[in-house]
Structures are given as structure tokens and as C-alpha cells.
């Protein structure tokens, strides 16, 4: 399905409604496209460009900057084995070689049944549980060859379906409420509606009618409390 289906088109329009400018929704809409098809197709990127008012080359140029996006079909499960220093010292290359033998593909390859794509990755930020890997960006640590075999067997037989969705799905919890976009939302509304109307007839994008909300980050660790206190003293 090269273009966004009706449900995902509505999700894209709802995302556009959260931003003063439609193009600001580009990255999250690309994730919706990849969730739908497993990768970013040319027709799909063209559709996204129409939605946010960008040329196809601008969409592809932006997407190509991020290694989470794929431009060719990949397996249902994308397995990335970390080979950075902490994992390397704990046997990452032995694990990667075992994975190649087990799956019958080299890094970058996909199994004949379309179930697994194998990658080697830089640091996955799970150094305390080296060697580690991710499956569709879900973390698995302290993986040895036997653990890898058990993991792929569980994936193949659907025993981890509740934990690991198919490739492209970042999160299965749908946004149920939005915040009003800061800035000239009244001016952005006609533009967003016009873009949506050019592409496909459908429900109008949701817009929050409540007051804009100021978001703040609360840091609670001892270390950051000390830093915050020193910062506040310096401002007084």
C-alpha cells in the first residue's frame, strides 16, 4: 500500500493540527508511513510531501538523515547487534557471527522468508547488559549465542508478539488528546485544511480548543537538584 490508508491519513492530519506549520509534522508522519508498510516507499513519501507541503526530494533528504528509516523492505523483525566497545569486550562479534550463521544472512541481509533482517549497530545505550541487541528497537541485554537462538525461536513462533510488534511500530498507544500548538494556530488552520483537501477527502483534523499549555521538565535526582539550585542562586 504505497500511500497512507484512510486511518493513517487521519492520524497524519491530526498530527499536522498540532503544529503551527504542517512541515513540522514530517518526522512523526514518516513513522506512521513506516509503521504501515515496514519501510518508506517512494509513493508513500510523495503522499507525505503533499500533506505537509514539501517536495518529494525534501522528504527523502530529511528521512535519509535518520537511520531508523528504511527505503527498502526489511524483515518483520529488525535485529540490530551492538558491536561498540562495551559489547565488543563482552563478545559482541562472536554473537554477531553466530547470528549470521543462525539466520543465514550477513548484516544488511534479510532471511528468505522475510522474517528477520540483521544489522550491526553502534552503541545501543545498554552497556550495563552487554552484549546487547534490539529487535524493532526493543532492548534485549546479556545475550549469548544460546539466548539469541531462544529469542529468534520465540519471535518466529509469536511468543513475543505482546512485547515486540512488527517493524515500524514505535508505540502501540495512540495519542488520544492534543495540546494547542503555540504560535499562530488560527493562521495555520486554513493552510492545514487546504493541504488535506488537496490530497483526499476525509474528516477534518482535530484541533484542541482549550488554552495553550506550557510544558516544563521536572528533574528529581539529587545531582540535578544540586545543579538546579546552583543555577537558581546564580540568577538571583
Image: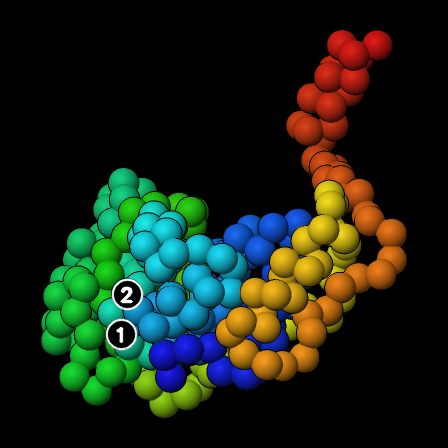
**In the figure, residue 196 lies in which quadrant?**
bottom right
Q: Is residue 193 above or below residue 225?
A: below
Quadrant the C terminus occupies? top right
* Disc ID at residue 107: none
Residue 71, disc: 2
Q: Nearer the viewer, residue 38 or 116?
A: 38
Which residue appears at 13% of the width and 71% of the height? 105
Q: Position of residue 176 (x, y in %)?
A: 73, 71
- Label pair 2/1, CB-CB below 8 angstroms: no
Q: Give the SS element for disc 2.
A: loop
Q: Is residue 19 left or right of residue 85?
A: right
Q: Secondary structure at mark 1?
A: loop
Q: Quadrant of residue 146?
A: bottom left
* Residue 1 place in picture, x, y as percent: 38, 84
Q: Nearer the viewer, residue 178 or 14?
A: 14
Give the residue at x 30% y 69%: 42
152 vs 199, left or right, is: left
Circle 2 crowding by C-alpha within 10 Å: few under 14, some 14–19, many from 20: some
Crowd around label 1: few <14 · some 14–19 · many ≥20 (10 Å): some
Q: Residue shown at 78%/12% (left/top)?
A: 235
* Residue underneath mark 1: 73
Report the residue at 41% width, 88% height from top.
Answer: 158
Q: Residue furthest bottom?
A: 157
Where residue 230 sits, quadrant-wise, is: top right
Amino acid at each position: 500500500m504505497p500511500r497512507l490508508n484512510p486511518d493513517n491519513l487521519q492520524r497524519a492530519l491530526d498530527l499536522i493540527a498540532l503544529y503551527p506549520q504542517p512541515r513540522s509534522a514530517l518526522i512523526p508522519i514518516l513513522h506512521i508511513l513506516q509503521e504501515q508498510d515496514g519501510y518508506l516507499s517512494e509513493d508513500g513519501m510523495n503522499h507525505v510531501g503533499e500533506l505537509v507541503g514539501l517536495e518529494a526530494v525534501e522528504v527523502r533528504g530529511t528521512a535519509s538523515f535518520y537511520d531508523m528509516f528504511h527505503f527498502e523492505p526489511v524483515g518483520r523483525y529488525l535485529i540490530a547487534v551492538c558491536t561498540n566497545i562495551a559489547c565488543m569486550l563482552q563478545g559482541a562479534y562472536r554473537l554477531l557471527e553466530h547470528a549470521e550463521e543462525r539466520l543465514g544472512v550477513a548484516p544488511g541481509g534479510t532471511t528468505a522468508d522475510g522474517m528477520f533482517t540483521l544489522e550491526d549497530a553502534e552503541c545501543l545505550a545498554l552497556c550495563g547488559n552487554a552484549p546487547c541487541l534490539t529487535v524493532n528497537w526493543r532492548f534485549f541485554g546479556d545475550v549469548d549465542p544460546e539466548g539469541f537462538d531462544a529469542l529468534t525461536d520465540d519471535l518466529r513462533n509469536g511468543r513475543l508478539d505482546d512485547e515486540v510488534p512488527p517493524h515500524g511500530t514505535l508505540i502501540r498507544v495512540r495519542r488520544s488528546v492534543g495540546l494547542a500548538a503555540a504560535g499562530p494556530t488560527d493562521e495555520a488552520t486554513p493552510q492545514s485544511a487546504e493541504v488535506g483537501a488537496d490530497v483526499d477527502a476525509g474528516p477534518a483534523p482535530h484541533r484542541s480548543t482549550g488554552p495553550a499549555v506550557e510544558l516544563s521538565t521536572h528533574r528529581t535526582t539529587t545531582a540535578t537538584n544540586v545543579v538546579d539550585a546552583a543555577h537558581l542562586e546564580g540568577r538571583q
